[in-house]
Amino acid sequence: MTARLRSALAASLLLCAGAAFAEAHPELQAFPPAQEGMERFVIALPHKERGEDDDFRVELIVGKEMLTDGVNQVRLGNAIEARTLEGWGYTYYEVSGSSATLSTLMAPPEGAPKVKTFVRAAPLLIRYNSRLPIVVYTPRGYEVRYRIWNASDTTHPAERD
């Protein structure tokens, strides 16, 4: 089995496990399905005990695979906005704004091949809450990725001025 196949298999298993957990999450029923032209993504975070959540943050990253010149930095003009679910008080996230691509203007070498790149909008850092799913609505064709950040146990004293 090649490394690429193992990686794809592992990703598929994680997606299936995450989807099964998300569908079984009782709080997910409060969130409406995606509207026409939109998609709904659900992130079920690993459980943390009360008080542990404060040591973690989740970075939401939305974007899509695009062909780029491989030289210029490209990003999407969208923004991830927090919204409140009426009647529940839960937070969900919606990708809004312009889907225009913004790019630096360096000239690529003549005849340079196009490169498939994950082009993303500005990320959003949110608090970690393992008791509720993170629900993100995006325009069709986008992907949602995330990273979990955690605080170090080490603190450093600041110098007095």
Image (cartoon, rainbow, N blue to C red):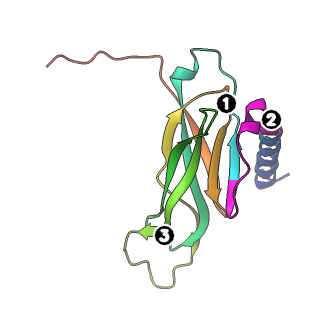
Q: Which residues are magenta?
A: 20-39
SS for dot 1: loop
Q: Which residue type does callout 1 highlight?
A: Leu
Compare marks 1 and 2 and give the one earlier in the sequence: 2
What x and y, as percent, mark residue 60? 56, 44
Picture layout, residue 116 above or below residue 60: below
| Residue that label 2 marks | 21
Picture layout, residue 82 above or below residue 127: below
On whether residue 86 falls in the magenta region, the answer is no
What separation in Å lies between label 1 and label 3 (alpha carbons)?
32 Å
| Residue that label 1 marks | 132
What x and y, as percent, mark residue 10? 79, 44
What x and y, as percent, mark residue 73? 44, 64
From the viewer's perspective, is 92 left or right of 108? right
Residue 71 visible somewhere in the drawing: no
- Neighbor class of circle 1 (other Cα within 10 Å; few <14, some 14-19, many 20+) is some
| Residue that label 3 marks | 100
